[in-house]
Amino acid sequence: MGEAKSGQLHLTLESTTESVNQIEAEAEKLAVEAGLDEDERFHVSMAAREGAVNAVLHGNRYDPAKQIAASFEITGAALVITISDQGPGLDPATIPDPLAPENLLRGSGRGIFLMRSFMDEVHFRQLHPGLELTLVKNLASSTQIA
Amino acid sequence: MALTIASRELDGVTVLDLSGRITLGEGSVQLRDAVRGLISKGQKHILLNLAEVNYIDSSGLGELVSAFTTAKNQQADVKLLSLTKKVHDLLQLTKLYTVFDIKDDEASAIASFK
C-alpha cells in the first residue's frame, strides 16, 4: 500500500522479494523525477534494491509477521530513500571488507559496499527493534527539483 | 525480466546463454541449479554467456562467485563471456574482475578451455 504526502511516498510492505522489486521500481521512478541520467538512475535503484534485500533477508528474514517501511523523497538538494525493518539490527562496522583478498570469494557481504559506492551518503540507525537505512543522492544544480 | 537459460555444447564446452536479471528471487537460484547440475554430471568446462544480462545485484554476484568456487572444488572451470557495460563495471567495482576469466569472443573463450 502507498500514500503520497507532500512529495513523499511512504510504503509499508511484506517481507518478500516482491517488496524488494517494488522498492527498486519506486527508487527508479524517483531518480527519473529527479532528472538523473541513466547511470545515476541505475545507481540509485540498485542501492535501494540492496537496502531492501538487507531489510527483507537479513533484517526480517522473510518473517511474514514483520514489515518493511520505505519512504521516497526529493528535497531541494537531494534524493532521499529510507528503508527500515523490524529485525535484530546490525552494526555495519562488523561487515567484512568485501574487497579484501581473503573476502573476494565470499558469496555475500557486498550489499552495503555497493550502497556506499553508489550513493553520496549512507546512514544506519538502530531501532528497537530493527534497523533504519537512509540513502542520500545529492542533486546537482542542473537536476534539482525546486 | 526473469532469467532464462539456454544450454548448448561446443567442442566439449557447455555454453549457458543467460538472458535477463541475476538477482535475489529472479535468477540466482536458476543459475545455481544450472551450474551445479552440469558439474554433478561431470561437465568440467562451463562458459556463462552474459551478453543479454544487464542487471546483477549482490545476490547475483554471490551466485557467480559460488559457481566459480563450486567448479574449482570439482576441478572444473567456469568462465564468463561478453559482459554488458553495467555488469563489467560492477565486476570491476567489486574486484571480481580479478577473480574470473572473462572473454569477449566466443571462439577464443572455447579455445581457452583446451
Image (tube, helix red, strand yellow):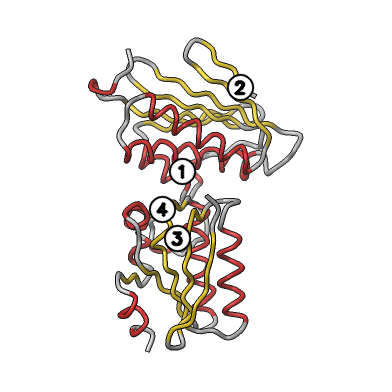
Where residue A37 appears, x then y in whole percent? 30, 34
Nearest to N terminus: mark 2 or mark 3: 2
Give amino acid for label 3.
Asn
Query: Which disc is residue A2 wearing?
Result: 2
Give amino acid for label 1.
Ile
**Whole-Å distance between the Cαs marked 3 and 1?**
14 Å
Q: Residues within 10 Å of mark 3 (few under 14, many from 20)?
A: some
Q: Label 1 belongs to which residue?
A: A112
**Whole-Å distance between the Cαs marked 4 and 3?**
25 Å
Q: Nearer the viewer, mark 2 or mark 3?
A: 2
Marked residue chain, label 3: A
Q: Label 4 belongs to which residue?
A: B54
- Verify CB contact (< 8 Å) between mark 4 and mark 3: no
Q: Nearer the viewer, mark 4 or mark 1?
A: 4
**Whole-Å distance between the Cαs marked 2 and 3?**
39 Å
In-front residue for pair A97/A15 = A15
